[in-house]
Image (tube, rainbow, N blue to C red):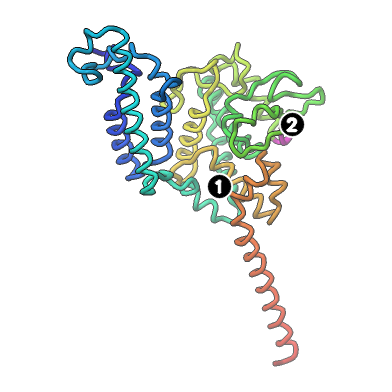
Amino acid sequence: MRREVMTVGLLSDADYIVQWAQWKTQRSGGHFHAGIVTHFQNCISCLRPETGYLWQHAELAIQLPQPERIGGNDYRNLDSEERTKRWRSWCEQNRARLETVLRNAEKSSVSSKSREPTEPIADLLALDEPLTPLVDMLRTMEAVMPPPTRRHDRAVHLRDTLLLKMLINNPLRVHHFSIMRMGPQGKGNIYRTSEGEWRIFFSADDFKNTSGAACDNYDVGISPFLWPDIDRYVSEARSELKGGCESTYFFLPSRIGGRHEKTPELDGKWGANYISKRVLHLTRLYLADSPGFSPHAWRALVATAYLRQNPGDFINLANLLHDKLETVLASYAHMRVDEGLKRYHLYLESAWKRFGQRRQQKGE
């Protein structure tokens, strides 16, 4: 029974997919969000005539709990050619239904993001210095560092602290932290020069499949204040983590790990999704009154903090985030008006005070 239930052939049955979508929609507060849309699109692609994976594999039909639904009660007794014909008809019918459900959802504007990405950090974005709470959080983490006798816990803590510091220092997307490899100059993504400087390098190819990213080489230094953290992580912590003696990936998963780290390894790396879960967990744990937020939100905080200090400097912000200028303008152009008004209001307040002082001097 388990062999029949756990089959990719179930993705051909629109009834199951629609029921799952209804369940997911209810769990997300009534939002037919982007994750559901993506799953529908994948199923539709697999059912596509000629090229779809499911459409090409009629043998999957017999693994379904009720294969007679596909071609009648005599389905098991049909010859191979007739089975294939009925299977493909079944695929086309279910594909059409999924397309209709998806199209109707989009027309009715039900499809939406399940939550505004900046919602968990709204209070931080409202601060004049949005990074201050993150710096305080990191200082707290340093203060509760496990002792050397707890080698594994200490290694995980050193890794976590360094990861969060680098999210502020070099605000790349989490994907690039997951694929970051350590090696000598010219071979590693993170390397130490002969002068002792730590640097990060990614080729243009590493960004080509990332929406909105700049598509040129990323070759930058890491702030010197982080070099001791990197040295300590490499010399003390990394070998205690999973694959630390063999893997070239820089950030590694825990050997044991809690529920935030359990993941089937892909080529020994700490996957981007699981790094995001870890960051969510850490911000919940160490940042007061926070629901937790992802590495993408850290990029938003870095960008906001930079523009607060450098109003209108979108070109350098694009370089900092390694994004295209149009991507940065689309995401942060609203701050041009907001920050511009703040600067004008400061000028107006100053001018008003000067006007009042002159009147006092004249005795008016």
Q: Is residue 322 above or below residue 250?
A: below
Instruction: Say which residue appears at 68% left-offset and 83% top-offset.
Output: 356
- Please tell me which residue lies in front, 186 or 65: 65
Element carrying mark 2:
strand
Query: Quadrant of the rendered structure where residue 10 is?
Result: top left
Neighbor class of circle 1 (other Cα within 10 Å; few <14, some 14-19, many 20+) is some
Q: CA distance from mark 1 to mark 2?
A: 29 Å
Q: Is residue 252 left or right of residue 205?
A: left
Magenta stretch: includes residue 97: no
Give coordinates of residue 3: x percent, y percent. 28, 11
Instruction: Say which residue appears at 59% left-offset and 21% top-offset.
Output: 237
Q: Is residue 191 visible?
A: yes
Q: Which residues are magenta?
A: 218-225
Residue type at mark 2: give it.
Asp
- Please tell me which residue lies in front, 356 or 112: 112
Instruction: Say which residue appears at 60% left-offset and 49% top-offset.
Output: 330
Q: Is residue 314 left or right of residue 264?
A: right
Give coordinates of residue 45: x percent, y percent. 43, 27
Give coordinates of residue 175: x percent, y percent. 57, 30
- Mark 2, residue position: 219
